[in-house]
Image (tube, helix red, strand yellow):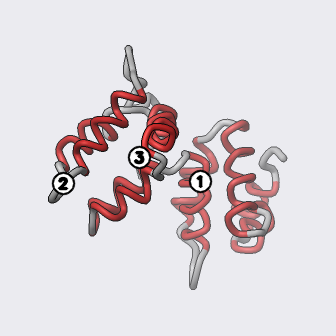
Amino acid sequence: MAHLGTPSIRPVFNFSANQDAETLRQAMKGFGTNNSKVVGVLCERSNSQRQEIARAFKVMYGKDLVDDLKSELSGDFEDLIVALMEPAAVYDAKQLHKAMAGFGTKELVLIEIMTSRTNKQIAAIRDAYKQLYGTDLEDDLIGDTSGAFQVKFALFPG
């Protein structure tokens, strides 16, 4: 997991969600998918711009962009593109849950996410986590960690 600092993907100047939605529609139209066009749009837009593209796609075509991408793509490429399409808070909530699932805890994931996000981002992650899993993020963090980790997570802003 990369350390948060200067984002590697910045919002595109003169961005058009409608144009990008059209480009994606064309990339998925017909036999096969033009993966280069999918990458060219989604990997060069910020998360908030990708969310705008998904909304524009829904308005323009009456279809869910992520569902269309899932039906057109496969394997690791599908996983990557679908992850890119998730709102940041949802993605982080899923990664935190995954890090605490099963035997053992992936502490580095917990540390990376919980120490590199702003209070506002943590609040959004907390809300997404509750909506996805029906439990409180803080309770799960405290229940899954011990010692210094537990104390640190107990002190996160609520």
Q: Secondary structure at mark 1?
A: helix
Q: Are marks 1 and 3 in contact (CB under 8 Å)?
A: no
**What is the number of callouts on the image?**
3
Q: Of circles 2 and 1, which is in front?
A: 2
Vertical placement of 110 versus 101: above or below?
above
Q: At 35% across and 56% down in the image, what residue appears? A: 69
Decide if residue 84 is on the left or right side of residue 122.
Answer: left
Instruction: Please tell me whether mark 2 sits on a helix, a strand or a loop.
Output: loop
Tell me if residue 154 comes above or below residue 156 in the rendering.
below
Q: Which amino acid type is shown beneath numbered disc 3?
A: Ala
Task: Locate residue 135, reporting x and y percent.
Answer: 78, 68
**Side of 75 relative to 83 (left or right):** left
Circle 2 residues within 10 Å: few <14, some 14–19, many ≥20: few
> Which residue is under mark 2?
30
Residue 70 image offset from top left, x and y in percent = 36, 62
Q: Which mark is residue 23?
A: none
Tell me the CA gap for discs 2 and 1: 31 Å
Q: Residues within 10 Å of mark 1 (few under 14, many from 20)?
A: some
Picture quadrant of residue 77: bottom left
Residue 27, how many percent across, how many down?
22, 45
Residue indicated by mark 3: 2
Q: Which residue in the structure is indicated by mark 1? A: 90
First of labels 2, 1 by sequence position: 2
